[in-house]
Amino acid sequence: MVLPDHAARLPELAIGQSGAGKSTYIGRRVFLAAGQDRQVIALDGKGDRGFVQAVTDAYLAVRPAGRPSTCSPTSLWTAGGATRPPR
């Protein structure tokens, strides 16, 4: 399946049971986005390091000079150096 360009630029949410292929799907979408010179933001609610590596590898496979940036789950809740609890 090939999405039209306007649809391919929309945000996506991958949900499903464990082992359903979500990470594989996201890795492929990241690979395609990198090939179209688009930025990618991928969030993993569990903080799985394997997921982070897979997404990074998929992007760098197309754009080896890319500069991926990752953050720890807790850094999402910081502002001005102070940790804020989730709302």
Image (cartoon, helix red, strand yellow):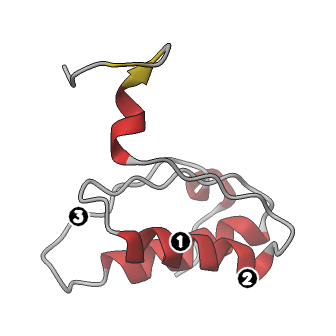
Quarter of the picture containing the C terminus is top left
Horizontal side of 42 relative to 46 (left or right) equals right
Tell which of 84 and 1 is nearer to you: 84
Residue 9: give its label: none
Position of 5 relative to 19 (above/below): above
Residue 34, horizontal then vertical, whole percent:
72, 67
Q: Residue at x 78, y 78 (%)?
A: 62
Q: Which quadrant of the structure image shows residue 74?
A: top left
Furthest toward the front, the residue is: 81
Tell me the amino acid under the disc marked 3. Ile
Circle 3 Cα neighbour tier, 10 Å, few/some/many (<14 / 14–19 / ≥20): few
Mark sitting earlier along the chain (1/2): 1
Label 3 or label 1, whichever lies nearer to me, is 1
Which residue is the site of mark 2? 61
CA distance for labels 1 and 2: 10 Å
Mark 2 and mark 3: Cα distance apart in space = 25 Å
Q: Which residue does the numbered mark 1 point to in the structure image?
A: 55
Name the residue tied to disc 3.
Answer: 15
Residue 73 spot, x, y in % from top left: 35, 45
Residue 29: name its quadrant.
bottom right
Q: Position of residue 16 (x, y in %)?
A: 18, 70
Image-based side of 31 in relation to 11, left or right: right
Q: Amino acid at mark 1?
A: Val
Task: Locate residue 9 relative to residue 44 in the image: left or right.
Answer: right
User: In this view, which residue lies farthest toward the left?
Assistant: 17
Where residue 55 appears, x then y in whole percent?
Answer: 53, 71
First along the sequence among labels 3 and 1: 3
The kind of residue on which mark 2 rests is Ala
Label whose residue precedes the other's in the sequence (2 or 3): 3
Residue at the limit of the structure toward the right, as seen here: 65
